[in-house]
Structures are given as C-alpha cells and as structure tokens.
Image (cartoon, rainbow, N blue to C red):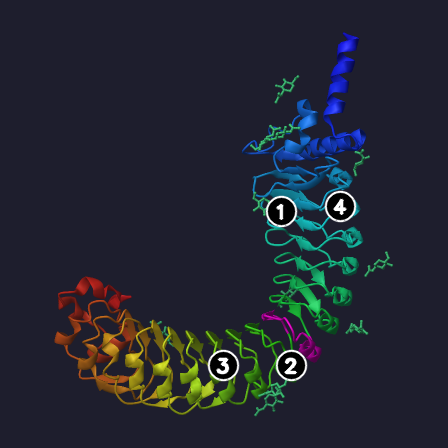
Amino acid sequence: MKMKMCSLLLFFLSALPSNISHSSYQSDHHTLLAFKNALSVDPWNALDNWSTNHTMTTCNWTGVTCSSRRKRVVSLNLTSMGLVGTISPFLGNLSFLRVLDLSGNSFEGQIPYQLGRLFRLRMLDLYRNKLEGSIPSQLGLLPSLEYVHLGVKNQLTGSIPSSLANMSSLTVLNLVNNGLQGGIPVELGMLTQLYWLNLNTNKLTGPIPTSLSNCTRLQILQIYWNNLTGKIPWEFGRLSEFLEQLELGYNYLTGIFPTSIDLLSTALSYLVLNSNKIGGHIPDEIANLTNLETVTFESINLNGTIPSALSQLPNMERLYLDINNLQGRIPTKFGHSKRLGSLDLSENMLTGEIPDSLGSLPQLRELYLHHNQLSGKIPASLGRCKTLQLVDLAYNKLTGNIPPGLPNLQFYFNVSNNLHLQGSVLEMSKMAMVLAIDLSVNQLLRWHSKSIGKLYRITIFKSFLERIWGTNPTIIGKSTKSSVLGSFTQ
Ligand SMILES: *[C@@H]1O[C@H](CO)[C@@H](O)[C@H](O)[C@H]1NC(C)=O
Ligand SMILES: *[C@@H]1O[C@H](CO)[C@@H](O)[C@H](O)[C@H]1NC(C)=O
Ligand SMILES: *[C@@H]1O[C@H](CO)[C@@H](O)[C@H](O)[C@H]1NC(C)=O
Ligand SMILES: *[C@@H]1O[C@H](CO)[C@@H](O)[C@H](O)[C@H]1NC(C)=O
Ligand SMILES: *[C@@H]1O[C@H](CO)[C@@H](O)[C@H](O)[C@H]1NC(C)=O
Ligand SMILES: *[C@@H]1O[C@H](CO)[C@@H](O)[C@H](O)[C@H]1NC(C)=O
Ligand SMILES: *[C@@H]1O[C@H](CO)[C@@H](O)[C@H](O)[C@H]1NC(C)=O
Ligand SMILES: *[C@@H]1O[C@H](CO)[C@@H](O)[C@H](O)[C@H]1NC(C)=O
Ligand SMILES: *[C@@H]1O[C@H](CO)[C@@H](O)[C@H](O)[C@H]1NC(C)=O
Ligand SMILES: *[C@@H]1O[C@H](CO)[C@@H](O)[C@H](O)[C@H]1NC(C)=O
Ligand SMILES: *[C@@H]1O[C@H](CO)[C@@H](O)[C@H](O)[C@H]1NC(C)=O
C-alpha cells in the first residue's frame, strides 16, 4: 500500500516538466484556493473546477494560464463572472503573475497592498467592481506595470499615491469615476511612456501639474468633472506630437485661454473645456488644429468674436460655444465645414443675420442659435438643408417670413419669442413633416382653422394658440386630426 502511494507520487512528479519547482507550483495552487476562499458568491459556478482534487490540473482551471516551461501562473483572468467577495492578499504570492484581470465583478473591500509584490505584473485590471479604500502606494513598486485600470464602479478614496510615478513602464492609467481626493501628483510627469491618463469624475483639487507636459506620448488626457483650479498650463503646448483628446471640462479652471493652443498637436480631434471659468477670446491660432472634430467651449466665459478660423476647420463635426459672452456676427465661412453636424451658438450676444451659408452645410442636423440678438430673416437656404433635425432660433430679433422651403423638412423647429417674426401661417400649414414647432410670442398672423387640419403631426404650443384665439383654444377640437393635436392642452 505504501509502495503504491509512493509510485503514484512518483508518477505525478514525473508528469511535471523536469526543471520546475514543485513547491512553487503547489504554492500557486494553494494561493488560488485561498483566493477562491475569499469569495462569497460565485453565481454561475465559474470556479467549480478550482478544486483540491486537481492539484495537477491547476493550470487548466477556469481563467488560469501558466507559463509553458515552469508551469507557474502567469495570468488570472476572471473578468465578468459575477464574483462577489474580497481580493485575497494571498494573490501577492503569485510571483510569476503578469496579468491580473478581475474586471466586471463585485469585488469589495480594499485592493490588497500585497499586490505590490507582483513585480512581474504588466496588467492590473480591476475596473467595474465595488472596491473601496485607497490605492496602495506599494503598486508604485511594480516596474513592469504597463496598464492599470481601477475605474468605473469602484469607490476608491484618498489621494493618488505619488509613488505611482515609479511605474516607469506605465502606458495606461485609468482611475475614472472614483472618489479620489487631493491634488494630481506632480511626479506623474515622470511617466514618459504614458499615452492614456484618465482621472475623469473624481474629487481632485488643486492645479493641473505643469509636469504633465513632460508626458509627451500622451494621446488621451482626461481630467473632467473634478474640482481643479488654476490655469491650463501653457506648457501643454509641448504635448505637440500625439495628443488627440484633451478633456478638462467641469472644473474651476481660470485664467485666459491658453495662448499656446496653436502648439498643441495637430492630431488633436477632441477638445473639451466646457464649464470652467477660463475667459478671454478664442485665439485665431486654433486654425492650426486642423483635425479638430469636437470642440466644447460651452460656458467658459469667452468674450470677443467667433474667429472665422474656427468656422473653417475642415473636420469639425460638433462645435459648442453656447453660454458665453461672444459678440459680433456668425462667420459666413461656416459653409466650408462640410462635416459639421451640430452647431450650438446659443446664449451669447451674437448680432447680425444668420448667414445663408449655414443652409449649405451638407450634414447639419442640429442648429442652436437661441437667446442671441440675431436679426434679419430666417435664411431660405435652411429649407434646402435636408439633414436638419432641430432648429432653435427662439429669443432673437428675427423678422420676415418663415421661408418657403421649410415646410418640406422633418424637424423640430423653435422660433418662439422673436417678437417681430411674422408672415403667412398659411405657408406653415403645409408643414406636414414638421415634428414639433414652437411659434409662441411672435406675430405670425393670418392663421385660420382650415389650415390647422394639415398640421397633423405638429405639436403646437398653447401660448401661441392663446394669443391667436384667446385663452381657450377649443376651436382645435373641431379638427379632424384632433388626436394628434393633443398637446394643445398641455
Ligand atoms: C473532490 O474530492 C472530494 C472528496 O474526496 C469529493 O467529495 C468531491 O466530489 C471531489 N470533487 C471533484 C470535482 O472531483
Ligand atoms: C489541460 O487541458 C489540455 C487540453 O484540454 C490537456 O491536453 C492537458 O493534458 C490538460 N493538463 C492537465 C494538467 O490537466
Ligand atoms: C475548467 O473549466 C474550463 C471552462 O469550462 C475548462 O476550459 C477547463 O478545461 C476546466 N479545467 C478542468 C481542470 O477541468
Ligand atoms: C480576459 O478574458 C476576456 C474574455 O474571456 C477577454 O476579452 C480579455 O481580453 C481577457 N483579458 C486579458 C487581460 O487578457
Ligand atoms: C502568501 O500570502 C499570505 C498573505 O499575504 C501570507 O500570509 C502567506 O504566508 C504567504 N505565503 C504562502 C506560501 O502562502
Ligand atoms: C520611487 O522609488 C524610489 C526608490 O524606491 C523612492 O526613493 C522614491 O521615493 C519613489 N518615488 C516616488 C514618487 O514615490
Ligand atoms: C467639489 O466641488 C463641489 C461643488 O462646489 C463641492 O460640493 C465638493 O465638496 C467639492 N469637493 C472637494 C473635494 O473639494
Ligand atoms: C520635465 O523634464 C525635464 C527633463 O527631464 C525636467 O528638467 C523638467 O523639470 C521637467 N518639467 C517639469 C515641469 O516637471
Ligand atoms: C474678455 O475677457 C478677458 C478675461 O476675462 C478680459 O481681460 C477682457 O477685458 C475681456 N474683453 C472684453 C472685450 O470684454
Ligand atoms: C500655425 O503654426 C505654425 C508653426 O507652428 C505657425 O508658424 C503659424 O503661425 C500658425 N498659424 C496660425 C494661424 O496660428
Ligand atoms: C423653444 O425655445 C424656448 C427658448 O429656448 C424654450 O423656452 C421653449 O421651451 C422651446 N420650445 C420647445 C417646444 O421646446
């Protein structure tokens, strides 16, 4: 009997590659069992075959990958398995581990500082869990770490450890949507391999460290929705080679618009600065950023005029300049922005006419010009712009008629509160395709009950009808299409 056991053991040993350390192999096995032991729920029995009976099959357990030679665990990938529990500190003993992916589960508690012993680790993916506590500064001891994602559903608090700057191979650091506080460590500027830094939606305070301008490989820099103060460092002009996305919106940044903007990478396609207190005017130099696709300068205290340069950027798709103090006219050159789909210039102090060229934009879907001081007529060209879905011209000083082409378009149309807009409502009665229209507070007269029958898909607003028919617009009820006119009484 004893003999038999012995030969069985010998058999197992001989089944292992000759040069592996049996004890280390067994230690990985025990570490994984300790990890499993710290789980409280495994809803789909994903780890059923992680069992003590199978010492020799550890490398075939769900989510486990071993090195081919030494049979040591090099990757643990248990993404999206519904697991609930804590991350066992024993994981720090998987000394050959290169990939740890526990994303998309419900791991709770702290990130064990023992992970700082996994000196071969290249990828640490713990995003979309329920982790709390602070980021262990020991992670900074991992020189091979290239990718760290601790974001999304976690609720990490405390400050970003400056030791992370010692992860000299780091290319991606994503801490989005946690509760991190304190300042952005100046030391992060040492991470010269970094191409994606995402600190969006935390509670970070203080200035944006100038040192980040030393991370010259940055392609994506996201720090929106924090409590940052101070200026956008002009040294960011140094991020001239690769930067594609710069998102600094929803902070308390001050100082005038960075004059180094023209030094930014011409690769920049996404520039989000909205909801800050930046101020100043949009520099002409923005013309150098020819790859801009999305520009969000909403609510940043801009003054001055809209530079014609901005209207000539060939790749612009979304341009939001609303809620500022912009003055002067809308540049006529917008007609050259062949890809422009969404233009929001609302809530400024723009004057002059709406340029006819806007109607020649082949992809324009949304046009917001409300709350300005625009005058003159609604350009007839809009009636030829077949892609339009929404036009909001409310609260301006527009005059004249609704142009004749508009009735054929299918869109949401708001021309309310243009006191002197007038003309033939008969024309509008042809607007069978218009989805909603707000004509309140202007002088569109000559309306009569016959014409309304054709407006069968239109939502007409009570205030408008009250003006025409007095306070009780029941006349509408006689329309044969009254059901679709239900919102009269709202
Ligand atoms: C492991 O062994 C135990 C006891 O020897 C047994 O009850 C269990 O069914 C075994 N599990 C598997 C997966 O073989
Ligand atoms: C692991 O699985 C593979 C294929 O499924 C098999 O060839 C191999 O023998 C198994 N190894 C162990 C140790 O069970
Ligand atoms: C454990 O389950 C996985 C997934 O079903 C399978 O690929 C693997 O071969 C199993 N390993 C063992 C040792 O049964
Ligand atoms: C983990 O596995 C999932 C699916 O099995 C895969 O999509 C993901 O890329 C893997 N993670 C790593 C780091 O290899
Ligand atoms: C593994 O890690 C745990 C916790 O960090 C520790 O208590 C234990 O002694 C380590 N060694 C082994 C062989 O499990
Ligand atoms: C990086 O590591 C060195 C040596 O281990 C240490 O002295 C230094 O404080 C670390 N840097 C940071 C920013 O923590
Ligand atoms: C950030 O600003 C918001 C709004 O002013 C405030 O409620 C919050 O307490 C601030 N957080 C920190 C960490 O300063
Ligand atoms: C950027 O790096 C250079 C050279 O390594 C260094 O001298 C400089 O102080 C760094 N700048 C900042 C703002 O950290
Ligand atoms: C524009 O704003 C800047 C900074 O807020 C200010 O210095 C400047 O005087 C303003 N210019 C005008 C024309 O209002
Ligand atoms: C564009 O950049 C070049 C060199 O970086 C500069 O000489 C030129 O003046 C810039 N043009 C504008 C309009 O800013
Ligand atoms: C039309 O625009 C005005 C001003 O922006 C707004 O108050 C009103 O609600 C809008 N009408 C509709 C139907 O949205």
Within-10-Å neighbours for mark 3: few <14, some 14–19, many 20+:
many
- Residue at numbered disc 2: 263
- Residue at numbered disc 1: 130
Q: Quadrant of the N terminus?
A: top right
Write down the region rendered in magenta. Answer: 230-252
- State how far apart marks 4 and 2 are (Cα): 40 Å
Mark sitting on residue 313: 3
| Quadrant position of residue 451 | bottom left
The mark lying in front, picked from 2 and 1, is 2
Q: Is residue 250 magenta?
A: yes
Coordinates of residue 394 in the picture (x, y in percent): 36, 80
- Where disc 1 sits, the SS reads strand
The mark lying in front, picked from 4 and 2, is 2
The residue closer to the viewer here, 426 or 444, is: 426
- State how far apart marks 1 and 4 are (Cα): 17 Å
Q: Please name the amino acid that badge 2 sits on.
A: Leu
Above or below, comparing residue 429 to residue 45 in the picture: below
Coordinates of residue 84 in the picture (x, y in percent): 61, 38
Coordinates of residue 133 in the picture (x, y in percent): 71, 50
- Where disc 4 sits, the SS reads helix
How many numbered marks does the figure carry? 4
Q: Please name the amino acid that badge 4 sits on.
A: Leu
Residue shown at the point (48%, 76%) measured from the top left: 315
Circles 2 and 3, Cβ within 8 Å, touching? The answer is no
Residue shown at the point (17%, 70%) measured from the top left: 476
Asked whether mark 4 lies closer than 8 Å to ligand 5, one says no
Question: Can residue 357 be seen at all in this image of the molecule?
Answer: yes
Within-10-Å neighbours for mark 1: few <14, some 14–19, many 20+:
many
